[in-house]
Amino acid sequence: MARWLPSGPARRAALALLAAAIVSIPLVAQVVQEPVDYDAVYRIKEEGLQRSKAMELMSYSTDVYGPRLTASPYRAAFTEWFKKTVGEWGLANVRTEPIPFGRGWTNERFTAHVVSGQPYPLIGYPKAWTPGTNGPVRGEAVIAIIEDESGFAKFKGQLKGKFVLSMPEREFITPFEPLARRHGAADLASLEQLGDTPQRRRPPMGDRTFREKLMAFYLSEGVAAVLDAGRGETGATMVGAGGSHDPKQPPVPCQVSLAGEHYNRIFRTLEKKIPVTIEMDVRNRFHEKAEAYNILAEIPGTDKADEVVLIGGHWDSWHAGTGAADNAAGFVPMMEAMRILKATGVTLRRTVRLALWDGEEQGLIGSRDYVKKYLADRQTMKLEPGHSKVSAYFNIDNGTGAIRGVYLQGNEAVAPIFRAWMEPLRSLGMTTLSIRNTGGTDHLSFDAVGVPAFQFIQDPVQYGRTYHTNMDTYERIEPNDLMRNAVIVAIFAYHAANREQLLPRKPLPKPVPPGQRPGMF
């Protein structure tokens, strides 16, 4: 090398630069590139995009076997179909695991009409875990808005056999924004920033105590039914629970959420001092010997088979629609991802386990039970043997929208790994990593005990106006999104199953003090 070096001060400067370059080489070499198996990526994309079964699975899960309210006896048919379907694909250890829940509930009939003046039918849905009307009932509608206990005296003795309008007229604001939308470049750029830490707000205990007293008052008065205006726009009516799946909780009256437009019409008519008579037939049934359970199936690994990559979403739904966006759009891509992995014949070093969680809508009950049983007790942080064997859990629960990236839940160390895996997925629109936490679904159960757990960033599409409503049906699903989401999940699961090390973890959280609810819930 000395033959081309200059002499004197210039030579010394050149040698210094050369030494600096040589010293820097080991540092660069330490930045190991995460391997990406492009052959497997090609095979997964070809199977998932050319021979997709996603919409067929969606139709069975919704049109045939929806809705799937937790502990409803009708769900047994879905379970048998699931077992048969994934068994034909060659998945192993297909099973159900019971979880503690309570009683089931089903609605068997609902009809409602205004029968005075100019008659018209009413759009509405009974609230879950509420009783029915014991046959057709006809009665007068009354406005009885009770906001505190002083209202009990005002309406005492006036509500027997009445249909009670329990809230003010609902305000409707014309939506000038599009009903559905995709994330734009600015949206995705914003998600890459940390953002503000959301503050958890829980309703005061007094609110729940007053509601129990209010329901007891309605029962003692002998109301025909309690009506409210369901949230939702342009024909969507949001419906949840009006009673409890816990049979030890106090009884409640029949409750019905009406379409806001119909509720408001009755309300305005009554304000004009014009009587309104309603006829309603609500047949609800409680199922005391109900079963709630998680559903699991897997593809066994090879040399690292005792380690696990979990993928999943919740399979329970509310009852007004058929549970398409919430959450067949979550568990169907996971099923399809498993089919793709089997159909392509790719080798998986770790076991890939599919989990369909039950009772998510009632508080992540299924995933919390699994975590406590196999991974860790959130209250004590006593770890089970399985805790050290889970590489990651990947979850979908934000509707039909295309996957655009991953919420990292504050796990900085996985960012370069996911960035490498995402490179061949840029053509599918997946480009964004957000360090932020996102809440409201089953990945929280795993994240709370220190297991790497992630929810995908998805286009909002029209999720906000369909979930928990009568419009949550097959028609609200975007076929291309569903198909691509399954491919993305399969590629992430494949690489997680085959990398040499488990995915990096955040520090273990501290135990939750006695009497305090875990922050994840």
Image: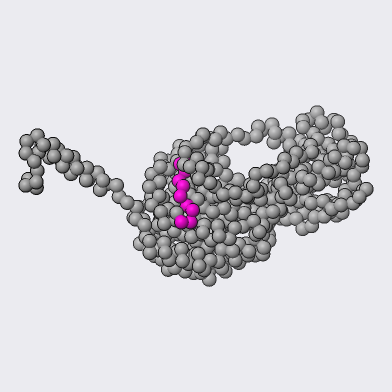
* Residue furthest to the bottom: 88
Question: Residue 189, percent across and down?
Answer: 48, 42
**Residue at figure coordinates x 47%, y 38% from the top left:** 193
Q: Which colour scheme is used?
A: one colour
**Residue at figure coordinates x 51%, y 34% from the top left:** 196
Q: Give the range drawn in magenta.
A: 427-437
> Could one spot residue 300 in this view of the protein?
yes
Question: Residue 433, percent across and down?
Answer: 45, 46
Of the 4 image quadrants, the one containing the C terminus is top right
Name above or below for residue 242 compared with residue 476: above
Residue 432 covered by magenta stretch: yes
Residue 282 covered by magenta stretch: no
Question: Residue 43, percent across and down?
Answer: 43, 66
Nearer to the camera, 185 or 268: 185
Give the total number of marks visible in the rendering.
0
Name above or below for residue 138 compared with residue 143: below
**Residue at figure coordinates x 77%, y 45% from the top left:** 260
> Could one spot residue 382 in this view of the protein?
no
Choose top left, top right, bottom left or bottom right for residue 516: top right
Q: In this view, does 310 lie to the left or right of 164?
A: left
Q: Is residue 404 left or right of residue 125?
A: left
**Residue at figure coordinates x 50%, y 67% from the top left:** 50
Question: Residue 483, percent across and down?
Answer: 53, 61
Choose top left, top right, bottom left or bottom right for residue 162: top right
Q: In this view, does 151 lie to the left or right of 317?
A: right
Nearer to the camera, 334 or 266: 266
Nearer to the camera, 257 or 245: 257
